[in-house]
Image (spheres, coloured by chain):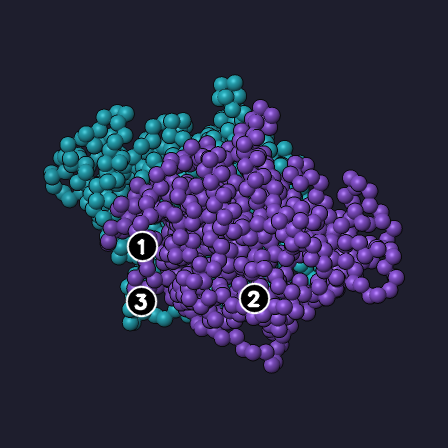
Chain colours: A cyan, B purple
Amino acid sequence: MSNEKLPIAVDLSHHLSEVSKARRTSPLKGLAKYMERPGVIALAGGMPNPSYFPFSSLSADALVPDSFPVSTSSSQSSSSSWFWKIFGAGQPKEKTSSVTIPKYAKDPRNNVNLATALQYGTATGLVPLQKFLQEFTAKVYQPAYSDFATLVQTGNTDGWNRAALTLCNPGECFLTEEWTYPSALASVSPLNMTAVPVGMDKEGMSATSLRKILAEWDESVQGKKRPHVMYTVPVGQNPSGATMGEERKKEIYDICVEYDVIIVEDDPYFFLQEGEYVPKSVRSTTSTPDDVSQYIASLVPSFLRYDYQGRVVRLDTFSKTIAPGSRLGWFTCNPVFAERFERAGEVSTQAPCGFGQSLITSLLLNWGFEGYIRWLRGLGAQYTARRDFIIDALADEFDLDLSPSSSAHAVGPWRGANVYVAKEKWQGTEKFAATGRKPLFSFVPPTSGMFIWLKVHFENHPAYAAGDDSLEMKLWVAIAEAGLVIGPGWFFAADDENSPDGPNDGHYRIAFSFSDNDEMKKAVDIFGKVVKEFFKEA
Amino acid sequence: MSNEKLPIAVDLSHHLSEVSKARRTSPLKGLAKYMERPGVIALAGGMPNPSYFPFSSLSADALVPDSFPVSTSSSQSSSSSWFWKIFGAGQPKEKTSSVTIPKYAKDPRNNVNLATALQYGTATGLVPLQKFLQEFTAKVYQPAYSDFATLVQTGNTDGWNRAALTLCNPGECFLTEEWTYPSALASVSPLNMTAVPVGMDKEGMSATSLRKILAEWDESVQGKKRPHVMYTVPVGQNPSGATMGEERKKEIYDICVEYDVIIVEDDPYFFLQEGEYVPKSVRSTTSTPDDVSQYIASLVPSFLRYDYQGRVVRLDTFSKTIAPGSRLGWFTCNPVFAERFERAGEVSTQAPCGFGQSLITSLLLNWGFEGYIRWLRGLGAQYTARRDFIIDALADEFDLDLSPSSSAHAVGPWRGANVYVAKEKWQGTEKFAATGRKPLFSFVPPTSGMFIWLKVHFENHPAYAAGDDSLEMKLWVAIAEAGLVIGPGWFFAADDENSPDGPNDGHYRIAFSFSDNDEMKKAVDIFGKVVKEFFKEA
């Protein structure tokens, strides 16, 4: 934390929901003064003696931070299949180091130990983890004010859920990208909290669309008060794969200041920033800077960097950087909100799981800050290689024509981008009369994250009729029947009826995070075959 | 599951709250049909490839199931201090066996492995864990109907929270013991859900008081509709330590059928059934039956045993039987409620932490059902020894007179019980004129759980004035200043103003779960000294 930064001076407590304001401060707070005295005997809480925890010690073989290269080249192979992991003779052996967590520690507050980690804990989590997260946040995200708080949660879905209930009363609406993470919608829709879809372009949420919605909001027409909370996935936007740059973030932040909007920044893909896709033929080996500060400077910044008013609630998770089963992440926000999030945690999940907390904390302490950064760089390079591999495979399967950002293809999330338009491969014959080599689908290569978002041009399908959106599901089933499951577009619609870009069928999300190269190649083959066949049907 | 049992035939879906009814079925359900086909390539979800999980394997040294004896005798020593655990030469070495979880398994669905456990999982948890819990529930709790469901949650506080939001609309009230677990109240009070306190006796919730409340409910007077949900801790009731027997459970169940009430049975202390306290001088060695069925039959049954209508939501947790940091437990209930709880889980915590799930599942599979039962028997004996030790210590510090259940002391949670009334020890002199050896406090030894609940007789204090409840806090502070922190009674009041037993100050809860014998002895010394001194003050 730089000394030049000041505590926030803006009072944002009017954003707290009625439910959140009514949450009681834990009565245990009153006991803390005594509980922390050395030598005090605590018979207040129902804590079992740690001798009754059946785990005497935990240990883990953990990969070393430089397990993955930091550079990507076109020849790089991605992770291999589980078959080889089990039976794999001839596979290079993973380099691991051992992490052990004893039941007891000499300095139990500061050293990770099971007697503490497996005991009832506060909703703030283990002290060494708190310290790591606070320092990590200061160094990496560099919030614009000094008194930011970090607080553990059990993954960003829990984080958003707690944030939404803390900030919104039932029936209120919130701003979000017109395509978004379905669970973010599903978690709050039972409280009649609905999404106001904001238009998108190649950098995700559009500042122009946002301003228009807020400026033109008329409570008497909309029947709801102007939204004061935004849910956004600014990096590796789910599903579009867009990355929001500095200028856009500043612009959106300023609009949120003007209209008094709280930004909930759900940022699981922050370290999966992949840069622009470069076709295989002209691609060169690239890598991120070795210097930690330069590496951090090479990433698009978090909204926190501009957050001089404390109106950003950032959600970080270990789901993509360690493992989804971690069910561990953290809030970064102003201390007033953090205190309310802590109260909400106390009466639901309490502390995150002690097994996960202790293993992850030990891993992070074992690696150290620089080691973890090295791990993240390697991980980012892996996802870049995966992104490149699957798009290369699409380029092998289809003719991909680059359509300029001024073209009619550059609409919706592709506004402002050069768009790849896929057509059946030209084979110098007349046998393509059926499709006339019309565009089959188009997409913009993602610049971060795990997903390719593409739009199939059903308007070129022989059976297409305006207003009929049945082809989307029909093609999805045909692909699934052929052995490939991808995400149907309607999953991700924030509000299908009120989309700023009008009817929006024909989208699919393809994840390149999981499968190995062979499987991804096979998937693209299936996709290619089924799509081409589909367009020939009458 | 016995073949004679039938599926439930009663429709209880009218108990679902508006929020719960509005929860969407996961769109992923629609994909499941294809996802489960062998050989299908799944590029739908954002799952990282498991090669990116930095943990190659986990292992744990786990105690063997018979680590603790099953019998208790007056000479048995309790767990020793952490100091000896770290430095302890001469301590008997713990017997452990090693549990290892590899990253990959040949049968990943049925064998615990990190590639599955640390991946995104469904809110139903790991398959081998599901199987263990379903079988454990069938064998131990023996629900009265055949199609009961079990579903993991992240501890009973999460369980109650999900149950309350699934069953109650904001503003509704629910039935509970007049003294209860504070977080159960705190979790739902922000939704303006309030507790209707039911009177208690030595078996916990009073059936008479329950019937009276329900029979006399007048919506026009109370301003709220009659409660249709009950929250109860029937074994080792928190804070009273009472155990609800078979007859009482049947009686309460029948009343709940009559008035259409859903019973949420929060039962963390089920395996800590300790029996009646027998004074040290006449105590003999006791142990639970070695035969598993006989052991299970020796425990008071769960409400599930009588639940022919599926109106019980049972909450089990590993917090007291494995460790609180497990943040893992499970619901047992009818399939309609279970499906709604699963939906609520999907959009908050998702699956419980994979580190905890995999380690606990491996431990349970390693121990087996019979091994886990053996562990639970040993644990129960430990708590019985602890309960005996602390009450023995109180008997050393005070004269404990046994006052019959017909006496004026047998009120509130002590109704129907013989009550220990503590007076300053008689030393054959006149120096006790100040207190006149009036009762200082009274209590009923707990028959289950972790807590002694006692009532200090402030009416015998020289500074006592009717209606003034400041002495409770004053004594609490004096004890804390002397180095002992116990639970102040007001924490546990369900609704102080509407308590069926009138003004109820002067209570304290003392946990005997954590400290070793030396520390408990010291705690009782401090408590004795401060209380006696306190009563001499004018």
Foreground: disc 1 or disc 3: 3
Task: Assess disc 3: are there few (<14), some (14-19) or many (≥20) residues with their C-alpha within 10 Å of its C-alpha.
Answer: few
- For marks 2 and 1, give the CA distance: 50 Å
Q: Can see residue B400?
A: yes
- For marks 3 and 2, give the CA distance: 43 Å
Pointers 2 and 1 in contact (CB under 8 A)? Answer: no
Residue type, mark 1 in image:
Ser
Q: Residue at x 74, y 51 (%)?
A: B456
The mark that comes first in sequence, 1 or 3, is 3
Q: Which mark is residue B108?
A: none
Residue A282 on image: x %, y %: 32, 52
Q: Can see residue A485?
A: no
Q: Residue at x 52, y 18 (%)?
A: A220
Residue B81 on image: x %, y %: 63, 70
Q: Residue at x 62, y 63 (%)?
A: B278
Task: Assess disc 1: are there few (<14), some (14-19) or many (≥20) residues with their C-alpha within 10 Å of its C-alpha.
Answer: many
User: In the figure, A273 relative to B51: above or below?
Assistant: above
Q: Which mark is residue A515?
A: 1
Looking at the rendered structure, the secondary structure element under dot 2 is helix
Q: Which mark is residue A86?
A: 3
Quadrant placement of the C terminus of chain A: top left
Tell which residue pokes out farthest to the left in this image.
A430
Foreground: disc 3 or disc 2: 2
Residue type, mark 2 in image:
Gln
Q: Which residue is tagged 2?
A: B382
User: In the figure, A74 relative to A501: above or below?
Assistant: below
Foreground: disc 2 or disc 1: 2
Residue A490 on image: x %, y %: 34, 35
Same subunit, labels 1 and 3: the answer reads yes
Q: Residue at x 29, y 71 (%)?
A: A90
Indicate the chain on which mark 1 is placed: A
Residue type, mark 3 in image:
Ile
